[in-house]
Image: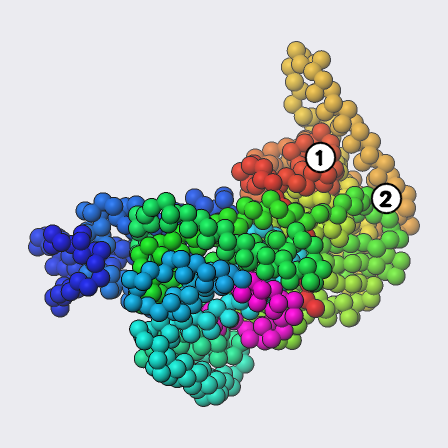
């Protein structure tokens, strides 16, 4: 075993295997578990996953894509850093274990590429415009030539490899663009929905396809030392395999799909057949002489889009991309010995390659961009974005190293180039490209300030289709008329997750009517159809469906930007709990709560949180049958005025009766705790006093106005209740008749009232305010939906912490760190 460390370097070592060396007899028998292949493999896998996860966590603030942490994790575990310690290298990554590791990594890769193929939709590629095509080609040709130029520099006569193959390998490695990584980066930068993002994605897709074809060629030529007839045979049989897949495999799979009735799950047998098919396809292409990965990819491509693809993705995605794929990247890192890059000359070449390859892409894309009259800045940004590297490049490099096309040195150089090129993109693009935000300050940010005879604009956020019926009934109750129509923007909130969302984003620009690619998209379709039907049946309502795809932590930015762009008066967002069958409330997803809290803090207009417990059953009612009894509890303050303004608008609807109950503090009510006399000259206290008086005055004016205008209206009942403390208030609310189907209350932000004293001490969800929380709690009469309204107050002493709409450059994340975000047009995808 002494020559182990030396053996780690040389490739021609003969390793003897004992067949019983798979599992140990246990530590107590005196066995070292690391001498056996299974425990060793498990340890290696867990080390790789843990390292990559830690790195993902560390690099998150720097907005780096996951690929980088995976490769860097491999480099850290490999000979460059930890592996310098020979004891560690021989214990954890000995040469004998490499076979098992690589085999598993390649299985992971096989299935991952199968998934890539399943998700890749050829029709999207067929529909990409000339512009994207030209950009993709230009972005490939120049770097390819640069790679070719360099390969002549790097290519020593010592290689037994023909120059042509070397050129092909380096060229492909430099010219590819990683589509999934690019999609993540665009989404992080919130550029997906700009024209720029769309073009970048389409050209990356085309580029990805070309890269696969080139890769197949490179492998075919790389397999044999002499470029002779055998290469031709490899290529011909590869083409034959593709034709076989298209004309025999695809119809067979279509037949399976036809055999399965609509909406049923696919039988285990079919799924099993397909998963085995991946292996067989891999075996065939490997036997032909291309790489097994190529077979899996083609096999994935011929699977028709639709429910089958969706099932496969759901079954495989997490396991493959979470566990097995990091293994592949880690292996690339393990093979990378940065120490092999020796001499200033080689490092010089390294820097040069990075600069020139970047420049090549940028110049190529800029050239095309100028032809299409795009601004130069956008051209440069596009060029930078096309430099993202990822999976394809790693596969090319690994195959090259296995085929002895690349020696350790060139391999290390290329891996470092890939990491650096992908890592610098986000920071550079953030600094170069800041799309101008159009500032249109608008007055009507609340319902109270909206003119009664002008259009009312609402933004409705939806997580799942279950929120739809109640929201449609609520919109119907909002009384759209010819004089004051309602314009609704329906925003479907989708979390940005791994690979699948990359395709989702591309698909969002698709024509509707195509089969949905995955569950999120199917949901989007249902939601859009529901609202489109509503728009056709109801008069005076226009609906615009949009989708926001972003991580939950920044989702509120998308919502706020959209509200600002569309000049909305009220955002309605569902509460994070929904009603269960037995009437209790359970949380749907804790992340929704964070979105709601962030939205309340940063919103550019009024916000309503809807606690959805059904509104008149969940049937869609025609406009003339609407009959609701709405209760509005009025305590005072801006939020309550806004709530009353909305209720007032609803009450104009002929089928709606409104009860307004105003609570007035009685004689015995204990006011806000008086401060000790020493503080009397404290100006802060005085402002609070005057503010309270001002609020009281505004309340009185608004209530009087409301009463005078609705004196003769039978459908409106106004009552006043005197209460002295929180308990009496609760009793009064509980005693109200149960005929109501909707409570509208203010959130009561910043108001201290003796009426709600003691209610806030044990509120579950402070974001609903004291009364809202009481009405939403499970023990309250559970059949009533609640709408909790917060009025947009703009700049005032009560909310200095709230970002005013004039400073959108700074967005605070939930830890209060101000991050300067590029404010692009946020991510909405309007279906065409």
Nearest to the observer: residue 569 or residue 296: 296
Residue furthest to the left in view is 29
**CB contact under 8 Å: marks 1 and 2:** no
Label 1 Cα crowd, 10 Å radius (few <14 / some 14-19 / many 20+): many
In the rendered structure, does residue 81 fall within the stretch colored magenta?
Answer: no
- For the point 55% across and 75% down, the residue is 122
Q: Quadrant of the C terminus?
A: bottom right
Q: Residue 746: x, y in percent?
A: 71, 43
Q: Residue 194: x, y in percent?
A: 66, 57
Quadrant of the image occupied by residue 396? bottom left
Residue 145 vs 77, above or below: the answer is below
Nearest to the observer: residue 518 or residue 144: 144
The disc at residue 244 is none
From where the camera sits, is residue 402 visible? no
Q: Which residues are magenta?
A: 112-141
Q: Earlier in the sequence, mark 1 or mark 2?
A: 2
Helix, strand or loop at mark 2? helix
Q: Quadrant of the N terminus?
A: bottom left
- Per the image, the residue denoted by label 1 is 723
């Amino acid at each position: 075993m002494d020559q182990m460390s030396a053996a780690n370097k040389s490739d021609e070592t003969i390793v003897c295997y004992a067949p019983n060396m798979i599992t140990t007899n246990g530590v107590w028998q005196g066995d070292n578990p690391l001498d056996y292949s299974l425990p060793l493999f498990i340890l290696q896998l867990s080390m790789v996953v843990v390292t990559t996860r830690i790195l993902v966590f560390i690099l998150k603030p720097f907005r780096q894509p996951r690929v980088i942490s995976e490769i860097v994790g491999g480099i850290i575990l490999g000979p460059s850093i930890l592996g310098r310690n020979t004891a560690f290298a021989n214990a954890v990554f000995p040469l004998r274990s490499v076979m098992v590791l690589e085999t598993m990594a390649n299985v992971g890769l096989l299935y991952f590429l199968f998934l890539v193929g399943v998700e890749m939709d050829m029709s999207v590629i067929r529909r990409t415009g000339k512009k994207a095509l030209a950009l993709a080609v230009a972005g490939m040709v120049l770097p390819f030539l640069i790679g070719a130029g360099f390969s002549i520099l790097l290519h020593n006569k010592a290689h037994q490899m023909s120059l042509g193959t070397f050129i092909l390998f380096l060229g492909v490695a430099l010219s590819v663009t990683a589509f999934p990584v690019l999609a993540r980066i665009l989404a992080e930068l919130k550029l997906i929905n700009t024209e720029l993002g769309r073009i970048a994605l389409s050209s990356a897709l085309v580029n990805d396809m070309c890269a696969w074809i080139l890769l197949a060629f490179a492998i075919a030529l790389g397999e044999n030392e002499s470029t002779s007839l055998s290469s031709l045979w490899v290529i011909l049989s590869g083409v034959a395999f593709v034709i076989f897949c298209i004309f025999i495999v695809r119809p067979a799979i279509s037949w399976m799909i036809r055999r399965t009735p609509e909406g049923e799950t696919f039988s285990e047998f079919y799924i099993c057949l397909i998963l085995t098919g991946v292996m067989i396809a891999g075996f065939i292409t490997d036997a032909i002489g291309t790489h097994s990965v190529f077979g899996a990819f083609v096999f994935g491509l011929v699977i028709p889009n639709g429910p089958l693809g969706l099932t496969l993705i759901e079954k495989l995605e997490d396991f493959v991309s979470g566990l097995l794929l990091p293994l592949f990247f880690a292996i690339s890192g393990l093979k990378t010995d940065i120490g092999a890059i020796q001499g200033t000359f080689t490092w010089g070449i390294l820097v040069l390659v990075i600069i020139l390859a970047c420049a090549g892409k940028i110049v190529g894309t800029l050239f095309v961009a100028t032809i299409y009259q795009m601004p130069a800045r956008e051209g440069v940004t596009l060029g930078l974005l096309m430099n993202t590297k990822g999976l394809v490049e790693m596969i090319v490099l690994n195959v090259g190293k296995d085929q002895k096309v690349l020696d350790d040195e060139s391999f290390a150089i290329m891996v470092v180039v890939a990491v650096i090129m992908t890592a610098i993109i986000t920071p550079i693009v953030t600094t170069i490209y800041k799309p101008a935000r159009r500032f249109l300050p608008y007055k009507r940010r609340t319902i109270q300030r909206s003119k009664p005879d002008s259009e009312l604009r609402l933004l409705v956020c939806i997580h799942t289709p279950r929120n739809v019926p109640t929201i449609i009934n609520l919109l119907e109750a909002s009384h759209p008329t010819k004089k004051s129509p309602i314009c609704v923007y329906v925003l479907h909130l989708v979390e940005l997750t791994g690979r699948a969302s990359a395709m989702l984003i591309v698909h969002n620009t698709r024509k509707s009517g195509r089969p949905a690619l995955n569950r999120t998209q199917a949901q989007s379709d249902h939601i859009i159809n529901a609202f489109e039907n509503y728009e056709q049946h109801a008069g005076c309502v226009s609906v615009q469906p949009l989708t926001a795809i972003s991580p939950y932590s920044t989702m509120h930015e998308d919502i706020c930007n959209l509200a600002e762009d569309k000049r909305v008066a009220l955002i309605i967002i569902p509460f994070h709990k929904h009603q269960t069958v037995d009437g209790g409330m359970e949380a749907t997803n804790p992340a929704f709560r964070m979105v709601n809290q962030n939205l309340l803090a940063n919103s550019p207009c009024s916000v309503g949180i809807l606690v959805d417990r059904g509104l008149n059953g969940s049937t869609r009612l025609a406009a003339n049958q609407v009959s609701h009894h709405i209760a509005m509890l009025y305590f005072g303050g801006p939020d309550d005025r806004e709530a009353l303004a909305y209720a007032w608008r609803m009450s104009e609807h002929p089928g709606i009766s409104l009860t307004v109950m105003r609570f007035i503090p009685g004689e015995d009510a204990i006011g806000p705790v008086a401060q000790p006399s020493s503080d009397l000259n404290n100006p802060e206290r005085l402002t609070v006093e005057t503010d309270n008086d001002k609020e009281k005055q505004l309340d009185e004016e608004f209530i009087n106005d409301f009463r005078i205008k609705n004196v003769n209206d039978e459908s409106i009942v106004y009552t006043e209740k005197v209460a002295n403390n929180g308990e009496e208030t609760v009793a009064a609310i509980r005693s109200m008749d149960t005929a109501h189907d909707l409570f509208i209350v203010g959130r009561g932000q910043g108001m201290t009232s003796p009426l709600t004293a003691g209610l806030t001490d044990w509120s579950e969800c402070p974001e609903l305010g004291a009364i809202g929380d009481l009405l939403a709690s499970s023990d309250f009469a559970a059949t009533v939906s609640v709408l909790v309204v917060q009025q947009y107050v703009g700049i005032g002493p009560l909310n200095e912490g709230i970002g005013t709409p004039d400073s959108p450059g700074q967005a605070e994340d939930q830890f209060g760190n101000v991050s300067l975000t590029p404010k692009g047009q946020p991510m909405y995808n309007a279906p065409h």
